[in-house]
Amino acid sequence: MSTESPHESLDALLATWPTADTVLSIDVQQVNHHYGSGEMRKQVLFDNHLQVRAGEIVIMTGPSGSGKTTLLTLMGTLRSVQEGSLKVLGTELFGLGTAATTELRKRIGFIFQAHNLFESLTAFQNVGMATELLGIPTSEAKPQIEQTLHRLGLGQRLHYRPKALSGGQKQRVAVARGIIHRPGLILADEPTAALDAESGREVVTIFQELARQHQCTIVIVTHDNRILDVADRIVSMVDGRIVSNVLVKRNQLLSQFLVQIELFRVLSTSALTKVADKFDLQSFPAGSEIIRQGDVGDLFYVIGSGQVAIEMDGQQVNRLGPGAFFGEVALIRDQPRNATVRAVEDARCFVLHKADFQTILQQSTSFEEELRKAIFSRQ
Amino acid sequence: MNRTPLAWKNLTYDKWRLFVAGCGIAFAVVLMFQQRGFQHALFDSTVEIVRELDCDLVLLRPNRFALSVETRFDRHLLDVAASHEGVAAARPLYIESLAARLRRDQQRAQPIRVLGFHLGDPIFLDRDGDLAPQLAALTAPATALMDRLSRAEYGFDFSSSAQWPQTGELNGRQLAVEGTFRSGRDFAHNGNLLMSAENFATYFRHRGPDPLGQVDLGLVKVAAGHSHEQLRERLQASFGAEVDVLTRQALIEREMAMWDRNTPIGVIFTVGTLMGFVVGVIICYQVLATSITDHLSEFATLKAMGYDNPYFVRLTILQSVYLALLGFGPGLVLSWGLFQFNASYTALPMILTVGRIAFVLVATLAMCILSGLLALRKLFSADPASLF
């Protein structure tokens, strides 16, 4: 069980769901990509789809040659989109002109595996190359650069050249250069590979701050298991295809929520996480019908917040609050809805589709038993 | 806002490489200066005699297309010229070189240019102040002054400890050289003698019953307050085809142009200058291209950050200009030293004028910028997609 109070974790959980005004930072639709031409032409990306919300931290994993780096360079405008649609920070990249590409690049922060610092410039000047490009006045940029470098443990080495810095320090200067101009999107390739545990942690902590406070979206290609915990979403690629795209942070919070409900307690942790991934969130304004008696039922509901009333033949028979579930009978027995459920106040429910629900039933007999017990106790 | 001086920093980071690069550029600069210097010196030498004349306009026969062509005009035309308003004086200069042979002791007789003038005519600028104290010595018969830049083969001793007079034979007759003056040799002449008109007449009787009746150059001084060009036009109009009237500067330019046109000197030294230029381009390209390839991933990172091609063009051109200036300074100093050495060794007038320095400076800048633009292709090829 979480040490957080259920209420807090519920708020955090609800916040992970997109709402109508959610902004997409990255929107990949049907993207294919080829290298080479003629007979040497080889497809490296196959029908990729990916949507990332502003402020999300995405970790991309996969074996080398799986296409994750290609996808990253496409997102970063470093390669041209050949097929499909790729929107980054609201700009369609397919057929984007040179000038627009240059402008867009200024809103993206790049952190490469190699530090790529100019040997001739000090740490401060290397970072300054990023602020200069955006025309940030020196008076404004100076304290920002100093503060960022300080934050990364380089406060004593502002005016050192890369030669006088260790590998980890150089990488941190490169990180500072990638984030100093508050980009809307940060693309990082193994940013922590050259860092010790402590510096690596400091870097990802800064990433988290940028994501939370400035709605900065961060895509990290990494094999560093130490930082997997910061991911909101983990995308795995194999052979040019996205084979899994999991909202880990949300699923974790949802599991924490579900496990408080007796029904779900019977599931193993891994089964629970799988179930959590299938849930959607639906909002219902006060007074609206969630399900109507007599309709065909195809969803299972768990109340996240708010109160609902169960009405049978126009008579209110019960009231349910957060943590309660309903809608299961119609799914088990393949019958129409036997009651109407109405939101008494603004309510948000986690919903599971019939097919997913039945999969759980088939896989876990204890879940089925628990469910029957619950239904029985209600009658 | 203060821009990070990346061009300068990258160029000066590796001090040793910068030193080698600077030496390379300086070498090319010296090469260009030397080639241009000799070219100018050879042309300058042909008009050195005119540059020493104190006159504003020069009268000469129209078919005297080069100073060494010995065609002359009647002396009375000078009187006509003198009668024109605005002419302060019109004086003759007599020149003999084809018919003049000088020998000393048992040496072979060698051609020499002999200049004759009336000792009372101040036709020489005499910048060194050599002439004035020696004019008295020239009043005696069979006397002359000798150009101390004349070739050593004449057998005269021009060292500072030399005893004067030294005697020789001009056209088989005794000549006492009473001292020296300074002029210079050129393509056509290995040395110069200067003597009074009276003595000139005695050595060159073949010029006619009145050896001084025919004048080689007429030297006109224009009176104060009169336009040289207007007077030139008036004189030319009155003389018609008999005599050409040129300003002193026009004569200098015409003479140099003649040598440029009729000798391969211009081509030879232009090729030499070009060689220096090409060497410079190669050296400069090597330096700039290495500077770029060594930092290719850094530049690719800048591209990924959103730096555009115009930025890289500016960066590279700036680096080229720095390199050009860093090489030009030492190159100029070195060239100046070499010019002094050359001038004393070859007796050629090696002159560094502002215009000539500017020419090499522009050539050096062009050289470095050209190599910079060639090196830019490497920079444009930096692919940020390769960084991931």
Image (cartoon, coloured by chain):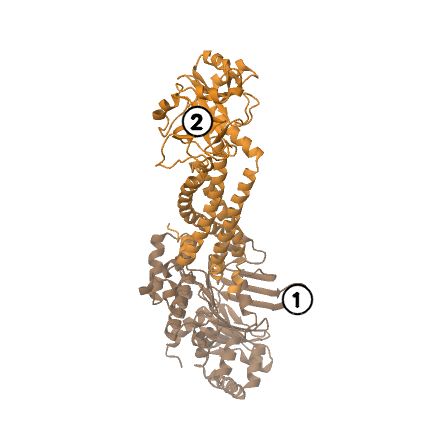
Residue B153, position as x, y percentages in the image: 47, 37
Chain A takes which shade in the image? brown
Judge by depth and name the residue closer to the eye, A328 or B228. B228
Judge by depth and name the residue closer to the eye, A165 or A40. A165
**Chain ID for label 1?**
A
Name the residue tied to disc 1: A40
Task: Specify whether A339 is left or right of A133.
Answer: right
Q: Is residue A19 visible?
A: yes
**What element does badge 1 sit on?**
helix
Spatial CA span between label 1 and label 2: 94 Å
In which quadrant is the N terminus of chain A drawn? bottom left
Q: Of tags 1 and 2, which is closer to the observer?
A: 2
Q: Amino acid at mark 2?
A: Leu
Residue at the right extreme of this rendering: A39
Q: Amino acid at mark 1?
A: Met
Judge by depth and name the residue closer to the eye, A119 or B325. B325
Q: Is residue B244 visible?
A: no
Judge by depth and name the residue closer to the eye, A233 or B92. B92
- Measured along the vertical axis of the image, is residue B157 above or below residue A147? above
Residue A28, position as x, y percentages in the image: 56, 64
- Measured along the vertical axis of the image, is residue A326 above or below residue B108? below
**What element does badge 2 sit on?**
strand
Residue B266, position as x, y percentages in the image: 54, 38
Chain B takes which shade in the image? orange
Name the residue tied to disc 2: B175
Residue at the left extreme of this rendering: A156
Mark 2: few/some/many CA within 10 Å (<14, 14-19, 20+): many
